């Protein structure tokens, strides 16, 4: 008998597409468009994620959307997300109240795993977040801020279009006060009458940070246009491509490497990403 | 099997197929509905066409239906997974389509297996029907050697003109063959004549000269002018994808019943040739022009997925060539990129 025919096509016990119930336990208003949610899994188990991973958030009757987990891994069954209302699922979620139920699948994707975290120890960590890109990085940022002594220095650069779009305002203010080896720089493209900070796109903050490119790990997330300019500016400073990590966004439907929507050439962003080392994908023409 | 060869007469074949139907199992085969020739369920063996005429849709529709409910839910928040899988026999599947099924099997079984596809696949028996000649001038299975594929079926029939020689590939195939069909064991190699005739019919057709190197060649030709010239013709209609046996991308949508008390989550075929396929919030489109999408689709066949599966993912069935309104063909594109076209190979 031909051994080529011996593919294992037995269905697995777990159904990939069946979501679990979660309750909304907290909602905070960040900006006009973005809300913060704390969710509690009804199965009483921790979500079991690592920083950089995402969930598929379901609203029955409307659909699913991939959403980053923005809290660091925890021992209880709660976790946080921050959602910008842009379409069907996200607008519907914004109409929900504390106590309402939603459904989730996940955690999915390749996040900042142990091997990346190991590489970060004793290094200068440079976070560069544009707009809603702060959300996918926040899980890692908050993990790193819990034990800042493990890193040489932590610099967080955060850019938004306008001051109203800045999220996590209180939290950010606290981080900025933490001192020690932590710095937090903000910029907005267009300030208003009350804005006294930096204005300009996020790349204008990079020259304000003193870093040795060989001993620094940069971690980037933001809107598609941002990556190119940030990469150019880091590489011009002499940073090796393998010191750069980025979290990417693509359209996703299944989140589990089947539907094909998230493909970037031959790479499934939902499975092999959303976190990538730039050196691994620099030749992929569909990255930027 | 132990140097012995099995054969089945045409009459016994039809009797066996009727037994399958009478057993309450669904039997899908090549059949005629009005003007159309297609793979569909039949209720009697005499509805089956033995002589292959290319179909518009491939047998992938039996495992990955165009629309499929994957979840059912109530507005009260009760969600259940829905898997519809019936015991099914697919009869008369051609080597190119068997290759297509094998690619889908690998894609859907990979890591966290797809519950719906695998359940359907597990409950099916696939009976292959070998080709003895090229089905039409649009088919190019020989370019990737797909006419000689046998993987993907449980047993295969080879039409010798008088009767059918049988090659068994799986245990399930052996068991089901014995259960439904009267076969005869022969000591002489009854396949020889068939194989010789087949080889003669395909002798003037060769594979891509650098078949094994296609992924590398495609990887190095992302900027080849063929993407622009062929992309400029493309109407972004997505027909090529619907008919392709190895395109399996899907969309997922929620639909509520009219009473708004119940709903379903449905997955349906989607097409990376459609403009909206890779659009994300903020209206950024990662494949803006037809040429980007065509490059993606063809690279999936001969590069990205070929690397993963170790074999061409285009099986050369020619369906997309027949469906395309502006004559775009994976064969021509590959030949242009490998240089075979200009050198007259
Ligand atoms: C890994 C990942 C993490 C993300 N994390 C967050 C997050 O933490 N917070 C947040 O607010 N958003 C996040 N997004 C973006 C979010 O998934 C989309 O905004 C959301 O899917 C839109 O769904 P909708 O039903 O509200 O919009 P739709 O009504 O479906 O469409 C509105 C717009 O969004 C685009 N879009 C539709 N589906 C997707 C999709 N699956 N991915 C991207 N764009 C899409 C459409 O093209 C359209 O322009 C993330 C996306 C990815 C891929
Ligand atoms: S790309 Fe065209 S010829 Fe190749 S397998 Fe798909 S439909 Fe058939
Ligand atoms: S989101 Fe479906 S394959 Fe990645």
Image: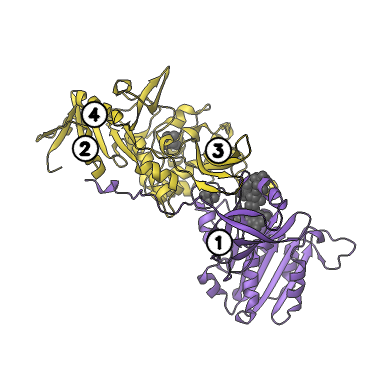
- Residue drawn at (51%, 71%) of the image: A114
Chain identifier of the residue bearing label 1 in the image = A
Q: Is residue B272 visible?
A: yes
Q: Colour of chain A?
A: purple
Quadrant of the snapshot with the N terminus of chain B: top left
- Tell me, yes or no, whether dots 3 and 2 are on the same chain: yes
- In the rendered structure, the answer to whether residue A82 lies left or right of residue B201 reads right
Circle 3 SS class: loop
Mark with earlier residue (4, 2): 4
CA–CA distance in space, label 4 to label 2:
16 Å
Furthest residue toward right: A193
Question: Above or below — where is A101 with respect to B28?
Answer: below
Mark with earlier residue (3, 4): 4
Find residue B237 and report its image quarter. top right
Residue that numbered label 3 is attached to: B273
The label shown at residue B16 is 4
CA–CA distance in space, label 1 to label 3:
26 Å
Front: mark 1 or 2: 2
- Tell me, yes or no, whether dots 4 and 2 are on the same chain: yes
Residue that numbered label 1 is attached to: A276
CA–CA distance in space, label 1 to label 2:
47 Å
CA–CA distance in space, label 4 to label 1:
55 Å
- In the rendered structure, the answer to whether residue A130 lies left or right of residue B194 reads right
Residue that numbered label 2 is attached to: B167
Q: Colour of chain B?
A: yellow
């Amino acid at each position: 008998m031909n051994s080529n025919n011996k593919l294992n096509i037995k269905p697995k016990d777990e159904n990939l597409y069946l979501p679990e119930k979660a309750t909304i336990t907290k909602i905070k208003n960040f900006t006009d468009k973005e809300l913060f949610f704390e969710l509690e899994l009804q199965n009483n188990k921790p979500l079991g994620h690592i920083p950089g991973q995402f969930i598929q958030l379901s609203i029955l009757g409307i659909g699913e959307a991939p959403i980053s987990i923005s809290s660091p891994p925890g021992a209880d069954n709660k976790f946080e997300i921050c959602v910008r209302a842009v379409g069907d699922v996200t607008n519907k979620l914004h109409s929900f109240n504390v106590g309402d139920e939603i459904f989730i699948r996940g955690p999915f994707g390749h996040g900042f795993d142990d091997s990346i975290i190991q590489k970060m120890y004793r290094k200068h960590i440079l976070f560069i977040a544009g707009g809603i890109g702060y959300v996918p990085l926040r899980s890692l940022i908050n993990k790193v801020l819990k034990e800042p002594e493990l890193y040489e220095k932590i610099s967080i650069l955060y850019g938004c279009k306008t001051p109203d779009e800045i999220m996590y305002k209180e939290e950010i203010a606290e981080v900025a006060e933490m001192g020690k080896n932590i710095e937090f720089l903000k910029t907005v493209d267009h300030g208003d009458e009350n804005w006294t900070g930096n204005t300009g796109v996020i790349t204008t903050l990079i020259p304000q940070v003193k870093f040795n490119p060989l001993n620094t790990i940069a971690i980037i997330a933001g809107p598609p246009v941002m990556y190119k300019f940030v990469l150019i500016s880091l590489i011009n400073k002499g940073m090796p491509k393998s010191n750069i990590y980025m979290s990417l966004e693509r359209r996703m439907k299944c989140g589990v490497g089947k539907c094909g929507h998230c493909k970037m050439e031959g790479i499934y962003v939902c499975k092999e990403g959303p976190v990538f080392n730039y050196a691994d994908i620099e030749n992929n023409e569909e990255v930027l | 099997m132990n140097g012995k060869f099995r054969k089945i007469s045409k009459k016994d074949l039809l009797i066996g197929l009727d037994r399958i139907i009478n057993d309450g199992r669904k039997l899908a085969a090549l059949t005629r509905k009005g003007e159309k020739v297609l793979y569909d369920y039949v209720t009697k063996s005499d509805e089956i066409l033995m002589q292959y005429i290319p179909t518009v849709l491939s047998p992938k529709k039996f495992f990955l239906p165009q629309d499929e409910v994957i979840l059912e839910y109530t507005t009260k928040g009760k969600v259940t997974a829905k898997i519809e899988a019936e015991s099914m026999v697919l009869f008369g599947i051609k080597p190119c389509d068997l290759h297509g099924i094998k690619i889908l099997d690998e894609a859907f079984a990979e890591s966290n297996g797809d519950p719906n596809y695998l359940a359907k696949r597990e409950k099916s028996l696939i009976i292959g029907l070998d080709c003895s000649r090229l089905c039409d001038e649009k088919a190019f299975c020989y370019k990737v050697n797909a006419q000689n594929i046998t993987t993907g079926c449980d047993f295969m029939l080879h039409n010798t003109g008088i009767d059918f020689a049988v090659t068994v590939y799986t245990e399930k195939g052996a068991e089901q063959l014995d259960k439904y069909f009267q076969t005869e064991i022969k000591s002489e190699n009854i396949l020889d004549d068939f194989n010789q005739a087949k080889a003669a019919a395909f002798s003037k057709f060769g594979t891509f000269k650098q078949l094994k190197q296609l992924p590398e060649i495609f990887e190095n030709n992302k900027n080849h002018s063929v993407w622009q010239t062929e992309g400029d013709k493309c109407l972004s209609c997505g027909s090529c994808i619907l008919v392709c046996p190895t395109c399996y991308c899907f969309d997922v949508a929620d639909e509520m019943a009219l009473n708004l008390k119940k709903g379903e989550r449905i997955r349906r075929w989607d097409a990376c040739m459609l403009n909206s396929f890779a659009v994300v919030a903020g209206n950024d489109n990662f494949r803006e022009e037809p040429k980007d999408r065509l490059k993606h689709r063809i690279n999936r066949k001969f590069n990205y997925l070929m690397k993963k599966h170790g074999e061409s993912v285009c099986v050369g069935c020619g369906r997309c060539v027949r469906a395309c309104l502006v004559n775009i063909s994976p064969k021509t594109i590959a030949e242009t990129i490998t240089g075979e076209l200009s050198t007259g190979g």
